Amino acid sequence: MAKPSYPTGVENHGGSLRIWFIYQGVRVRENLGVPDTPKNRKTAGELRSSVCFAIKMGNFNYASQFPESQNLKKFGVEKKEITVSELAEKWLDLKRIEMSSNGFVGYESIVKNMVPRIGGDRFISSVNREDLLIIRKELLTGWKVPKKGHKPSKGRTVPTVNNYMTTISGMFSFAVASGYTAENPFNGISALTRSRPDPDPLSRDEFLRLLDSCKHTQIRNIWALAVYTGIRHGELVSLAWEDIDLKAGTMMIRRNHTLTKEFTLPKTEAGTDRIINLIQPAIDVLKSQAELTRLGKQYQVEVKLREYGRTDVHPCTFVFNPQIASRNGRAGHHYAVGSINQSW
């Protein structure tokens, strides 16, 4: 088996990649902390080239490029203070490869909301616990001096506020681990407690009335199957006839559709497909729906895998096709998650 080829200045170190270059007349090495793959070797080579070019041009900032490097002490380089906005940008850029696009949009939205409240131009070392407690209070109560002609902002729910605080606390934990600041100001701030409302499921009478109110057979079948199986909205709109075996009475959940309009793997802890054993009413619903869409067109659907940048293709004849119920002729070949919410 041929040995892997490495770009100049790139080498394997314990299964991970590192680069070497000459700085101030000294040969130094920096671990990148990424696995040794062909794609990462190429990226590491490009990084090494950019570092060498910056050194040659005299504008290389060691602390900015490698903030966690042990070599900073060797060259007497002090870690630069960074602002809340700079920290947020670095953190989000690294988070992007850890999660789905749908999950990342949620993080991005929280950061966009919280950074101006904390102060984007502030150095992170200046943020203290009192600042954060005041921000939490404003988020919860909506207290804010309104502009002339505007009403005060409405407060957010306890779960939402806790989510905001936990997310930004993670960003500051990253800052501590990276050496940008000595302490996480969120330490010691406990989550707000909340009372859980009692479950309020549909009664049998309400369920029958719901189905009677549906004007189209397909819409009635959507909600009937949703109740009989308990699957998520994103899984419901992703369902294909290729996933269903009516003879065996089973349905395989292989995909989820997100608010960012992407197909992803289902949200299961094991990361595998989920099989649902159908009760007879669910089978009857699918038999009714089969008359509408079973012989429809098959589409090749790109599904994002959990590993960053990897995808798979699923052949899908969608169980629920909005084109058969649409009157404007602009419907796609599967429902969006938002349209199911609107239908409810």
Image: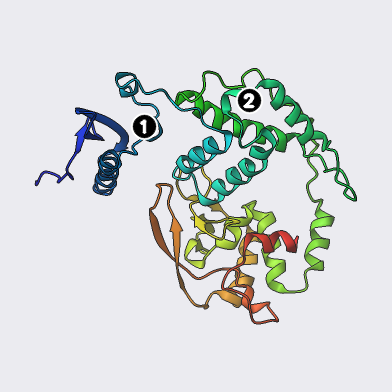
Above or below residue 80? Residue 115 is below
- The residue lying at 50 percent from left, 48 percent from top is 100
Extreme residue toward the left, this view = 1
Foreground pick, 31 / 335: 31
* Residue type for callout 1: Phe
Q: Name the side, left or right, on which 99 lies relative to 66.
A: right
Foreground pick, 297 / 47: 47
Q: Name the side, left or right, on which 298 lies relative to 193.
A: left
How far apart are labels 1 and 2 at the CA level? 24 Å
Q: Quadrant of residue 134?
A: top right
Foreground pick, 107 / 26: 26
Extreme residue toward the right, this view = 149
Q: Residues within 10 Å of mark 2 (few under 14, many from 20)?
A: some
Give the residue number, with chain letter if any, for mark 2.
Answer: 127
Q: Residues within 10 Å of mark 1 (few under 14, many from 20)?
A: some
Above or below residue 343? Residue 36 is above
What's the mark number on residue 66?
Answer: 1
**Secondary element type, mark 1:** loop
Q: Residue 265: percent from the left, percent from the top?
A: 48, 52
Q: Earlier in the sequence, mark 1 or mark 2?
A: 1
Q: Is residue 256 in view from this perspective?
A: yes
* Residue type for callout 2: Val
Q: Is residue 269 in view from this perspective?
A: no
Q: Residue 153: percent from the left, percent from the top?
A: 82, 43
Answer whether labels 1 and 2 touch (C-beta < 8 Å).
no
Foreground pick, 296 / 183: 183
Q: Quadrant of residue 288?
A: bottom right
- The residue lying at 44 percent from left, 45 percent from top is 97
**Secondary element type, mark 2:** loop
What's the mark number on residue 120?
Answer: none
Q: Quadrant of the C terminus?
A: bottom right
Q: Residue 145: percent from the left, percent from the top?
A: 85, 38
